[in-house]
Image (spheres, rainbow, N blue to C red):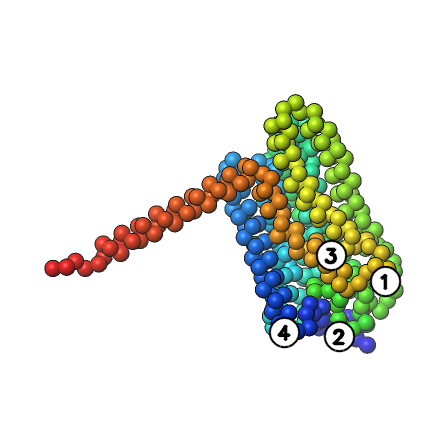
C-alpha cells in the first residue's frame, strides 16, 4: 500500500472507454469552455467599457464573471487534455492546486451571491439609502471580503485534506480533484474529518441561503407594493436573474455535498459535479443578459462600436494599399 509521501500523481476518472467517446467529450467540453470564456469575457469588457454600468450591481456582476472564469478554467482544461491525449494522471502538486482553487472559487461565489442579494435588497427596499450603504468604497470592501473568505476557507480545507496519510491507492472517482475523493483514499479514520467538512460546508452554504431567502421575501413584498406595472417589471428584471443563478448554484452544490451515501454513485456524482462546476459559469452571463435590458443595450453598443472600428480600419488599409500601387504610364 502507498502512503501520501510516496504518491507523486493521482489518477482521475476516465469519462469514456473508447477513443471516439473521448474525442466527443473533448469537443463538447471545448465548446462549453469557449462559450463560457466568450460570454463572461464579453460581460467583463462591457461593464468595464460602458460608464453607465459603473454601478454596484454591475461591479458585483463583473466579480461574478471573474469567479466563473476561474472556476471553469480550473477543471475543464485538464479534463479536456486527458480526453485528447488518452491519459488520466494529474500530478500531486497539480491536484493540490486544483483542490485549492475549486474550493476557493466556489466559496467566493457563494459569498458574492450573498453580497449581490444584499445589493438588490437595499436597491429595492431602501432606495433612499442606496448611495450611502453601497458606495464605491463599501462595494470594494464587500467584494474583497468575498474573495478573502474564499481564500481562507480554501486554505484551511486544502491543508486539512492534504495532511491526511493516504494508503488506499491514488485513483479518484471524479474527473477533477475534490475533497471527498481524497478523503476516501485516507488510511486513517476520516469520520471526524468528514463530519467537520460537512458541518463547515453546511454552515457556509446554509449561511448564504439563510441570508438570501429573507432578503428576497422582503424584496418581493416591496415589489408587489409598487403601483405601476412598468416599475414592477423593472424591479423583477434586476432580481430574477440573480435569484435564478443562486437557485442553480446553491441547489446543485448542496445536493452534491449533502446527499446521503445510499444514493451516491459515480455517474450521479459526475452529473451533479458538472451541474455545479461547469453549467453555472456557462449560463450565468446568459441568464443576466436575457433579463437585463441595460446590459443588452450596452453589449449591442459595444459590438456596433467594434464592428464600426473594424470597418474603418479595413477601409483605411484598403486606401493605403491602393495608394502604394504603382501607376500606369
* Residue 134 % position (x, y): 64, 33
Callout 3–callout 1 Cβ contact below 8 Å: no
Q: Is residue 35 above or below residue 163?
A: above
Residue 124 numbered tag: none
For label 4, the crowd category at 10 Å Cα-Cα, with few meaning under 14, some 14 to 19 and many 20 or more, is few
Residue under the point 79% across and 61% down = 180
Residue under the point 62% across and 50% down = 283
Dot 3 corresponds to which residue? 272
User: In the figure, is residue 148 to the left or right of 47?
Assistant: right
Q: Looking at the picture, tell me which residue is in the foreground, 253 or 50.
A: 253
Asked where in the image residue 6 lies, by quadrant, the reply is: bottom right
2 or 3: tag closer to the N-terminus: 2
Q: Which residue is the extreme one toward the bottom?
A: 1
Quadrant for the N terminus in the image = bottom right
Callout 2–callout 3 Cβ contact below 8 Å: no
3 or 1: tag closer to the N-terminus: 1
3 or 4: tag closer to the N-terminus: 4
Q: Secondary structure at mark 4?
A: helix
2 or 4: tag closer to the N-terminus: 2
Dot 1 corresponds to which residue? 190
Callout 2–callout 4 Cβ contact below 8 Å: no
Q: Which residue is the extreme one toward the left?
A: 329
Dot 2 corresponds to which residue? 6
Q: Nearer the viewer, mark 2 or mark 1?
A: 1
Q: Looking at the picture, tell me which residue is in the foreground, 186 or 299.
A: 299
Callout 4–callout 1 Cβ contact below 8 Å: no
Amino acid at each position: 500500500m502507498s502512503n501520501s509521501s510516496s504518491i507523486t500523481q493521482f489518477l482521475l476518472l476516465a469519462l469514456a472507454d473508447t477513443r471516439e467517446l473521448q474525442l466527443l467529450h473533448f469537443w463538447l467540453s471545448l465548446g462549453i469552455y469557449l462559450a463560457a470564456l466568450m460570454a463572461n469575457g464579453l460581460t467583463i469588457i462591457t461593464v468595464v467599457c460602458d460608464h453607465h454600468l459603473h454601478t454596484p450591481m454591475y461591479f458585483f456582476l463583473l466579480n461574478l464573471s471573474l469567479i466563473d472564469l476561474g472556476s471553469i478554467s480550473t477543471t475543464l482544461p485538464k479534463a479536456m487534455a486527458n480526453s485528447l491525449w488518452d491519459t488520466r494522471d494529474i500530478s500531486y502538486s497539480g491536484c493540490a492546486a486544483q483542490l485549492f482553487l475549486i474550493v476557493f472559487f466556489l466559496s467566493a461565489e457563494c459569498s458574492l451571491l450573498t453580497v449581490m442579494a444584499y445589493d438588490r435588497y437595499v436597491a429595492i427596499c431602501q432606495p433612499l439609502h442606496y448611495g450611502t450603504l453601497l458606495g464605491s468604497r463599501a462595494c470594494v470592501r464587500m467584494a474583497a471580503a468575498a474573495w478573502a473568505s474564499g481564500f481562507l476557507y480554501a486554505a484551511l480545507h486544502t491543508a486539512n485534506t492534504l495532511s491526511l496519510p493516504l494508503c488506499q491507492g491514488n485513483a479518484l472517482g471524479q474527473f477533477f480533484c475534490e475533497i471527498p475523493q481524497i478523503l476516501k483514499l485516507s488510511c486513517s479514520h476520516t469520520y471526524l474529518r468528514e463530519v467537520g467538512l460537512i458541518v463547515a460546508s453546511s454552515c457556509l452554504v446554509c449561511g448564504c441561503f439563510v441570508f438570501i431567502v429573507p432578503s428576497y421575501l422582503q424584496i418581493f413584498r416591496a415589489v408587489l407594493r409598487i403601483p405601476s406595472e412598468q416599475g414592477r417589471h423593472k424591479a423583477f428584471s434586476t432580481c430574477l436573474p440573480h435569484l435564478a443563478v443562486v437557485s442553480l448554484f446553491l441547489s446543485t452544490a448542496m445536493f452534491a455535498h449533502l446527499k446521503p451515501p445510499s444514493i451516491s454513485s459515480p455517474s450521479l456524482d459526475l452529473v451533479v459535479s458538472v451541474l455545479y462546476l461547469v453549467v453555472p459559469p456557462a449560463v450565468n452571463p446568459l441568464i443576466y443578459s436575457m433579463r437585463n435590458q441595460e446590459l443588452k443595450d450596452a453589449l449591442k453598443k459595444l459590438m456596433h462600436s467594434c464592428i464600426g472600428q473594424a470597418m474603418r480600419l479595413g477601409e483605411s488599409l484598403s486606401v493605403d494599399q491602393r495608394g502604394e500601387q504603382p501607376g500606369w504610364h
